[in-house]
Image (cartoon, helix red, strand yellow):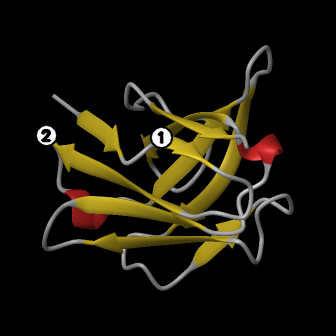
Amino acid sequence: EVQLVESGGGLVQPGGSLRLSCAASGFTFRNYGMTWVRQAPGMGLEWVSSINFGGISTSYADSVKGRFTISRDNARNTLYLQMNSLKPEDTAVYYCAQGGTWPSPYRGQGTQVTVSS
């Protein structure tokens, strides 16, 4: 059974940083690309970033490019999202998903990120 568990969310001031983690189990993590998506209040799911299985190829939504960095540790079966220079419009529930494209049939329960002064 595919399991994805996000952590690392919280309340941060504008301009601050957070690092999200996603612990994966139930599948061979190193064989899959992975993706982060988010859902702001009252909005649909928005693709944020993807990384290929080896961690060499990454892609980002224009709204986060230059501020967010996706990475992975295949030895620890963990996906990361480093978020810097956070803005109020980054407030959302962040989900990791199996696969290097979106949509995906598997995603975690999400972690809340709130950017507010």
Q: Element under label 1?
A: strand
Q: Quarter of the image containing the N terminus?
A: top left
**Callout 1 amino acid:** Gly
Report the Cα–Cα distance between label 2 and label 1: 27 Å
Q: Residues within 10 Å of mark 1 (few under 14, many from 20)?
A: some
Q: Is residue 113 left or right of residue 30?
A: right
Q: Element under label 2?
A: loop
Residue at 25% over, 67% down: 30
Q: Nearer the viewer, residue 105 or 83?
A: 83
**Callout 2 amino acid:** Gly
For label 2, the residue is: 26
Q: Position of residue 74 (x, y in %)?
A: 22, 71
Number of callouts: 2
Q: Residues within 10 Å of mark 2 (few under 14, many from 20)?
A: few
**Residue 57 - label:** none
Q: Position of residue 29 (x, y in %)?
A: 23, 58
**Outermost residue, right direction?**
62
Asked if 70 appears above or below 66 in the picture, the reply is above
Q: Nearer the viewer, residue 17 or 48?
A: 17
Asked if 93 appears above or below 90 in the picture, the reply is above
Residue at 72% over, 68% down: 85
